[in-house]
Amino acid sequence: MRAYDIIAKKRDGMSNTAEELTFLLTRYIKDEIHDDQMAAWLMAVYLNGMTEKETTDLTQVMMHSGDCLDLSAIDGVVVDKHSTGGVGDKITLVLAPIVAAAGVPVAKLSGRGLGFTGGTIDKLEAIPQLQTTLSNDVFIKQVNDIGLAIAGQTQNLAPADKKLYALRDVTATVESIPLIASSIMSKKLAAGSSKILLDVKFGQGAFVKNLGEARKLAQMMVHIGQNLNRETIAVLSSMAQPLGYAIGNALEVEEAISVLRGEGPEDVRRLCLILAGEMLCLNGKVKTAQAGERLASDMLDTGAAYQKLLQMIARQGGDVDTIIQNKLPKATCQRKIFASQNGYIHHINGQAVGTASMILGAGRERKEDAIDLTAGLRVNKKIGDAVSVGEELATLYYNESFAAKIHEAENILLNAYHIAEQKVTAPSLVAEIIKAE
Ligand code: URA
């Protein structure tokens, strides 16, 4: 077998076999096949696509390229959740404790943010002293003891995906449905849960920009799950505007806590309840997603979900008093932006909002960049809200070391808002739910 022939088949619109994909990937991780050939193959995939069978085979090769977690020592059916990433997406911080408080074990491995979207592990690290690196044994014991653990992915989870992703990133081949689907599913499958809920986000504040592409991605991932015997459901949720009001790590933790206390923004609460309903139903705890939503709502309203998060923070060494007393660290400088016309908010470009927050230090442009956990922004107005000239639209939060960037961030944020005279209503939060036939 030769890499050249495998690339030529893909270039000519044919399918690669499981043996060919195994050959390509296993040799690539061992540096026996180099970036030049792999880049050519990636571009051929980008241009010609992959069948469902090829995508499932690729997923399996990447999944088995490193550690696969064995969660069989956890009592009960473990349900995992994954978001394809969106601006202001703090859903895991609320959803995981809701589901755990309802008695369903949550063993969640999460990632860090890159580019304009954030990552759950960075957000959790805004809580002083909280540990996100847990050994497998500690992780599993914590789930058995308190029903909830959220930790960072180990270095050796789907390493083939990690190496391939870095190459995709520099060869303009990230935006390929089979490559995204196999990348996400290889990590989810290696993480060991028997059921998977996917929150596939679409819109300007997400990685996938339109509903049609999000639907194709969701269908592909649901089929991969089905082919590999892991029941998978995908919720297609809109990122026509940022989720909630806060963007940035400590600011988002603060907002998630306020939702857990029954005070937070309605869109975050609503999406958490819908996703929780599906997770509780996937686990078999309830018979319908509607019953799951009612149970989830009780977990929020009684404070049980809030207590569950506090329990997890304490168990992972975090400073619980900081949360209880609302004393998360804050940035030292603020800058407000104001409306320059009367009207209604028609659109908020989430990618621009995420970028404004990133350049003030809240996110990473490159994987190796350090981040400022206190930086970010808060939008005051959302789609459909009326505004008048001079009214405050948003506040940027940053530290002195980023002062030179404030004008750029301010301009990007101002341009993110589209205000017009006609009244509008915000698009619905969830467009579709996709399940295996
Ligand atoms: N997230 C992933 O994990 N992989 C992709 O390819 C895209 C988004």
Image (cartoon, helix red, strand yellow):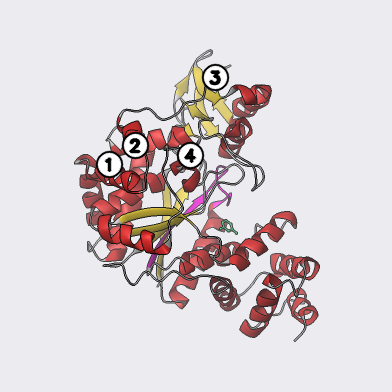
- Residues tagged 2 and 3 counted as in contact (Cβ below 8 A): no
Measured from the top left, where is residue 177 in percent x and y? 60, 63
What's under tag 2, amino acid-wise?
A: Ile
Q: Which residues are magenta?
A: 195-210
Q: CA distance from mark 1 to mark 2?
A: 7 Å
Tell me which label, 1 or 2, sits earlier in the chain.
2
**Residue 88 got which mark?**
4
Closest to the camera, between mark 2 and mark 4, is 2
Residue 128 in view: yes
**Residue 257 got which mark?**
2
- Residues tagged 2 and 4 counted as in contact (Cβ below 8 A): no
Q: CA distance from mark 3 to mark 4?
A: 20 Å
Considering every residue shown, the one lying at the far top of the view is: 390
Tell me which label, 1 or 3, sits earlier in the chain.
1
**Based on the displayed image, in which of its 4 quarters is residue 1 positioned?**
bottom right
Is the residue marked by circle 4 packed among few (<14), some (14-19), or many (20+) residues within 10 Å?
many
Read off the residue under disc 3. 333
Measured from the top left, where is residue 306 in percent x and y? 27, 41
Measured from the top left, where is residue 10 in percent x and y? 73, 76
Q: Cβ(mark 1) to ligand 1 < 8 Å?
A: no
| Near-viewer residue (310 or 334) | 310
Residue 416 vs residue 4: left or right? left
